[in-house]
Amino acid sequence: MKLPKQLDKDGVEVDVRAALEKDQFEICSDPHISISSFELNPELRKNIFYAKALGELVIGYETIEKSLASEKKGLLNVDNQSERVSRMLIVTNDGSERFYRELKYLQHKQGGRVLICRLNVDSILMGGILGLKERLIKAVLINRKTSVVNVLKAVLSVEEF
């Protein structure tokens, strides 16, 4: 996985990579396909909310899937297909087996540009993080590189809720 160049410039790429590899979640009982899993901390919560406030967040799996497909089509048209992470899909820990199976196919279709991670919160808390207390949110996509970098750095924060 090629992480954003900014992490290397900031001297934290090795630490971020270690944090992402530390706790893995097997998608749909397939030991060959796993995603990073991490705990919520105040810095992470803040950066996810900031991404939403900046309009750099897509909410809901179907909307995310359409957005990524549209981006992929555009990238194919200009022949610009990098495997460097530029998008981050964060899912909650209360998805169904079918939901996680969908992630496997999404990961296959999108390649290395989309980093899929599981945040160890349920969809109720994710809605609260985003200021949408009445909504259950199982998936959010951070679709701007700067916010992806900020969220990845926030994963390094050791203080948990």
Image (cartoon, grey):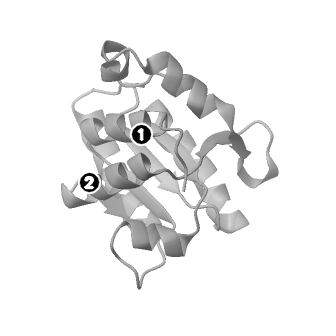
**Callout 1 touching callout 2 (CB < 8 Å):** no
Q: Residue at x 62, y 48 (%)?
A: 104
User: Residue 34 versus residue 46: which sits nearer the camera?
Assistant: 46
Q: Amino acid at mark 1?
A: Ala
Measured as percent of width and height from the top left, residue 113 is found at 41, 34
Q: Is residue 105 left or right of residue 76?
A: right
Of the image marks 1 and 2, the number of the one nearer the N terminus: 2
Q: Amino acid at mark 2?
A: Tyr
Q: Residue at x 47, y 67 (%)?
A: 126
User: What quarter of the picture does the C terminus occupy?
Assistant: bottom right
Residue 1 showing in the rendered view: no
Residue 67, compared with residue 98, is above or below; it is above
Q: Secondary structure at mark 1?
A: helix
Residue denoted by label 1: 154
Q: Is residue 113 left or right of residue 105?
A: left
Residue 131 showing in the rendered view: yes
Label 1 and label 2: CA atoms lie apart by 12 Å
Q: Residue at x 34, y 42 (%)?
A: 72
